[in-house]
Amino acid sequence: MSIFAAPGAYDRAITVFSPDGRLFQVEYAMELVNRGATILGIRCSEGVVIGAEENVEPLEEEEYSWKIFKIDEHVASAIVGLSSDARILIDQARVYAQSNKLTYDEPIDVEVITKRICDIKQLYTQHAGVRPFGVSIIFAGVDKTGTRVFGTHPSGTYRGFKATAQGAGRETVVGMLREEYKENMNLEETTKLAVKCLAKALEARQLPPRMKIAVIPSETKKMEILSNSKIESYVKELGAGK
Amino acid sequence: MEKQGQQGGYLWVPGATTVGVVCKDGVVLASEKRVSYGYLIVSKGAKKVFKITDCIGAACAGLVSDMQILVREVEAYVNLFSLDVGRPISVRSAAKLMSNLLFNNRLAPLITQTIVGGVDEEGASIYVLDVLGSVIPDTYTVVGSGTEVAIGVVEEGYRESMTMEEAKDLVTRAIKSAVSRDIMSGDGIDFLLITKEGMTEETMKF
């Protein structure tokens, strides 16, 4: 038997390591996430911006979002992967946010929400008879510690970022963010950068610049979803600047 | 008819004079050191002022067992909080945690009145908690059997711009006044002086 087992032998149950120390089911979940529509989160001193590629069908309600969710007034999230799996985690995150208010009488830290959700994700990589959550979530928000952005994976790991992206366009977007992210950007500039990155990621796959953006300014600590017309005006501005 | 806290004419809740004051430099928490059941002084050296974190403390009146259990439990939760969240807990959250413990025990209440005080990012603050866990923010407050006497002294002398030393003097005067008229208070004072640099414990014996 080869030391490097072929996938297929060790991917029936997620709780079983392959001989070369891999959990194939978890890796497949990552693969699913890597094929989803791009999401991103960027922070600056004036607030956080969260964005997602999201094509609204002609007959769909315009203000409805499958990609960006409010967790609490001060925390937003963007999801990539299975929407149905994400809903469960989003609902749970909302419960944690409210529960924190009851226990500590203050809004929950973004990192705490992230950690709680990743605790759940981790459970589903270890218990028998379950499959991992096929979803990555970016949490962004403004709390006592400042503006925060966290990226999570189906495996249950999470990291803090200044700017991050996940999904099909992540390489394009992360490449752009590395070039263009500046510490001293204001919220307007950060929002424009988010639009630019998503438009570029869509363009790379010959798709029209359709997206959803939400911002949380440090000043108000309240999440706002940008109107479609506002986003369109940013996209137009981008086209003019080329 | 028997008074509340009495059984067969025997008073089973010890008295106390416990004061909390917010001043310019931080917070002063103080309490006298007597524990009595009925006509007997059980202890002349009890401690009714507790440290919770490096910059949060609690001062209690009521059953000594209950205050010890309550403060230890809050201390455990507060330590878990700072490990989990990665920053020190705020005074408000510590008070709220204690309030939850008290409220969850409302059917068999912990017989304690507590002042939670300390200094955090938002500055110095104190909160008063009753037996069932109400959380009331304040700038100065007194709990225990000596309240009626002590509160008059604190109210008369209190200024927000007080230094730690002035606040400590005021609290000492207030507790000494209560001790001279309240039979269940006496034997010395424990202080917890909290500034943003940290906390110091002091004891004064009569």
Image (cartoon, coloured by chain):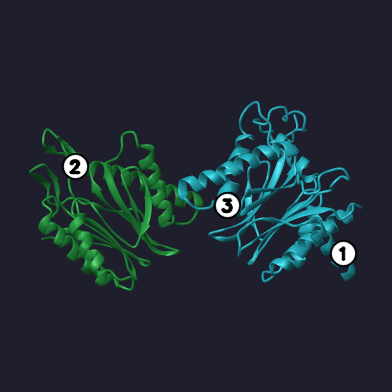
Chain colours: A cyan, B green
What's the CA distance linking mark 1 and mark 2?
A: 75 Å
Disc 3: which residue: A111
Where disc 1 sits, the SS reads helix
Q: Quadrant of residue A229?
A: bottom right
Q: Quadrant of residue B131?
A: top left
Q: Which residue is at 64% across, 66% downward?
A: A46
Q: Quadrant of the C terminus of chain A?
A: bottom right
Where disc 3 sits, the SS reads helix
Residue A242 shows up from this direction: no
* Residue B43 percent coordinates (x, y): 13, 47
Q: As drawn, is B11 to the left or to the right of A36?
A: left
Where disc 2 sits, the SS reads loop
Disc 2: which residue: B13
* Residue A209 percent coordinates (x, y): 86, 55
Disc 1: which residue: A236
What's the CA distance linking mark 1 and mark 3?
A: 35 Å
Name which residue type carries label 2: Val
Q: Looking at the image, is A91 positioned above or below residue A76?
A: above
Q: Looking at the image, is A237 positioned above or below residue B61?
A: below
Which chain is disc 2 placed on? B
In the depicted view, which residue is nearer to us: A168 or A222? A222
What's the CA distance linking mark 3 and mark 2?
A: 44 Å
The residue carrying pointer 3 sits among few (fewer than 14), some (14 to 19) or many (20 or more) residues within 10 Å by Cα, namely: many
Q: As drawn, is A37 to the left or to the right of B93?
A: right
Number of residue marks? 3
